[in-house]
Image: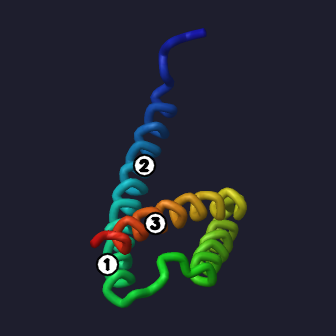
């Protein structure tokens, strides 16, 4: 097998790397907002876990993903992980004294 990487493959990899950077940037922005939500929930005495809202977000994401040709269960799983992590972060903020 040849160790030479075809130029076309290298181009695809560069495109994926650029998209990965955008994904990470957007995740950072999302979790910055999660931090603000945690502060608001602490200030207002709101529950961290709001199950109805979490389900709405996952349903919406799955539908958006499916409309774009993605496996909706895959998208739902990604959002479950993000929401679970958001809850951990919000609990840390709400539980601060």
Sequence order check, earlier mark of 1 and 3 = 1
- The residue shown at (34%, 58%) is 25
In the rendered image, which residue does mark 1 sit on?
A: 39
Q: Is residue 71 above or below residue 39?
A: above
Using the numbered discs, state the Cα–Cα distance from disc 2 to disc 1 in whole angstroms.
29 Å
Q: Which quarter of the figure has residue 65?
A: bottom right
Sequence order check, earlier mark of 2 and 1 = 2
Query: At which x and y percent is residue 89?
Result: 40, 64
- The residue shown at (66%, 69%) is 62
- The residue shown at (48%, 60%) is 85
Along the viewing direction, whichever of 94 and 61 lies nearer the viewer:
94
Mark 1 residue crowding within 10 angstroms, few (<14) / some (14–19) / many (20+): some
Q: With 55 as the anchor, is 92 left or right in this view?
A: left
Secondary structure found at label 2: helix
Q: With 4 as the anchor, is 78 left or right in this view?
A: right
In the picture, the quarter occupied by the N terminus is: top right
**Marks 1 & 3, CB-CB < 8 Å contact:** no
| Colouring method of the image | rainbow
Q: Is residue 47 above or below residue 12?
A: below
In the rendered image, which residue does mark 2 sit on?
A: 20
**Marks 2 & 3, CB-CB < 8 Å contact:** no
Q: Is residue 57 above or below residue 22?
A: below
In the rendered image, which residue does mark 3 sit on?
A: 86
Secondary structure found at label 3: helix
Along the viewing direction, whichever of 31 and 19 lies nearer the viewer:
31
Which residue sits furthest left? Answer: 97
């Amino acid at each position: 097998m040849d160790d030479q990487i075809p130029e076309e493959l290298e181009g695809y990899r560069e495109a994926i790397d650029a998209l990965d950077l955008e994904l990470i940037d957007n995740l950072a922005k999302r979790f910055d907002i999660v931090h603000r939500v945690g502060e608001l929930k602490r200030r207002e005495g709101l529950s961290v876990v709001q199950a109805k809202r979490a389900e709405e977000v996952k349903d919406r994401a799955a539908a958006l993903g499916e409309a774009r040709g993605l496996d909706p269960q895959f998208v739902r799983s990604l959002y479950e992980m993000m929401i679970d992590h958001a809850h951990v972060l919000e609990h840390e903020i709400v539980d601060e004294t």
